[in-house]
Image (spheres, rainbow, N blue to C red):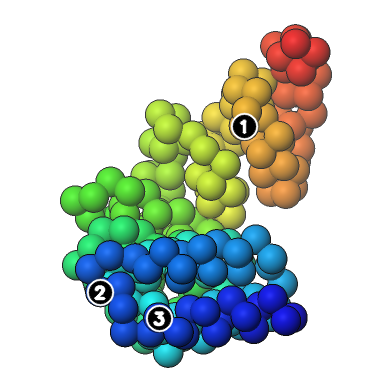
Amino acid sequence: MGAVVALETLCRRFRGFGLKHPVAEQTAALEALAEIGGGEAAGAVRRIIVEKIVQGSGLNNALKAAARLGVGLPANVIVSSLRHEAPEIRAGGCRCAGPSSAAIPLLLELLDDPDHIVAREAACALGRIGRNDARPMLLRLLQHGPSAVVIDAISAIADEECLVILGRIARTTPDLADAALEALESIGSPAAIKIAAASRRSPARRSTSSG
C-alpha cells in the first residue's frame, strides 16, 4: 500500500502539467500502478483520472492503466473520453467502457470512426457487453486480424460461424490457440464444446504444440 500511495502522490505532484506532452514521471507511475495491480492501485488510478490529475495526451496512459486494472469509471468520464478529439483517447475510453446507457450509443457511433483502432476498440467494447451490433465487425477482425482481445470480445456474442473460425484458429494459430480454446469452452454450448474437443485432437494442433 505504501508504494501505491507514493505513486499516486508522484502523479499529483505534476498536476496541471502535460497538456501537450505526457509527463514522464506520471507515465512511469501509472505503469507501475498497473503492474502492482489490486484494489488499492485501481482506486488510485480511478482518482487520478476522475480528479483530472493527468491531463492532455497523458490521459491516454491513465486510461491504459485503468483498462488493465479493470477500473470502473463514472459515466461522465467515459462519455468525455469517447467524444475526445484525440483518437487514442477515444480508443482508451472504449477499453474502459461498460454497459452504461450513456456509453452504448457513443460506442455504436464509433463503429464508423475514421480511425480503425477506435472502431476496433468500440466493437470489442460492445462485444464484451453482449451487443450483437458488434458481431459483423468482430467477425471480420476474427477472420483477417485476430487477436486475444478480439477473441475475448466475440465470445459473448458468438454465432455458429464464429465458432467455426475459433476452431480453425485453435488448430492453426499457435499464438492464439489457447485463447480460442478458452473462448470456446467458456461459451459452453454443445457446438462450442464439440469444436474445442475436435481442435484439441487435430493433427495440426498436436504438431504445432510439439514443435
Q: Which mark is residue 14?
A: 3
Q: Please report whichever mark, 1 or 3, sits nearer to the chain's N-terminal start.
A: 3
As measured in the structure, the alpha-carbon distance from the residue carrying label 1 to the one carrying label 2 is 38 Å
User: Label 1 amino acid?
Assistant: Leu
Q: Which residue in the structure is indicated by mark 2?
A: 19
Which residue is rendered at x = 66% and y = 78% of the image?
4
Q: Which mark is residue 99?
A: none
In depth, the one of 104 and 51 nearer the eye is 51
Tell me where residue 60 appears, x and y as whole percent: 38, 64
User: Label 2 amino acid?
Assistant: Leu
Q: Please report whichever mark, 2 or 3, sits nearer to the chain's N-terminal start.
A: 3
Tell me where residue 186 appears, x and y as whole percent: 72, 49
Q: Secondary structure at mark 3?
A: loop
Residue 121: name its quadrant: bottom left
The answer to whether residue 38 of the structure is visible from this angle is yes
Q: For the image shown, how many numbered marks are present on the structure?
A: 3
* Lateral position of residue 209 relative to residue 123, left or right: right
* Lateral position of residue 164 relative to residue 114, left or right: right
Tell me where residue 178 appears, x and y as whole percent: 71, 34
As measured in the structure, the alpha-carbon distance from the residue carrying label 2 to the one carrying label 3 is 11 Å
Q: Secondary structure at mark 2?
A: loop
- In the rendered image, the vertical position of residue 146 relative to residue 150, given as above or below: above
Q: Which residue in the structure is indicated by mark 1?
A: 176
Structural crowding at the residue carrying mark 3, measured as other residues with C-alpha within 10 Å and reported as few (<14), some (14–19) or many (≥20): some
Q: Are circles 2 and 3 on residues that touch, CB within 8 Å?
A: no
- Quarter of the image with the C terminus is top right
Q: Secondary structure at mark 1?
A: helix
Which residue is rendered at x = 53% and y = 51% of the image?
153
* Lateral position of residue 200 relative to residue 57, left or right: right
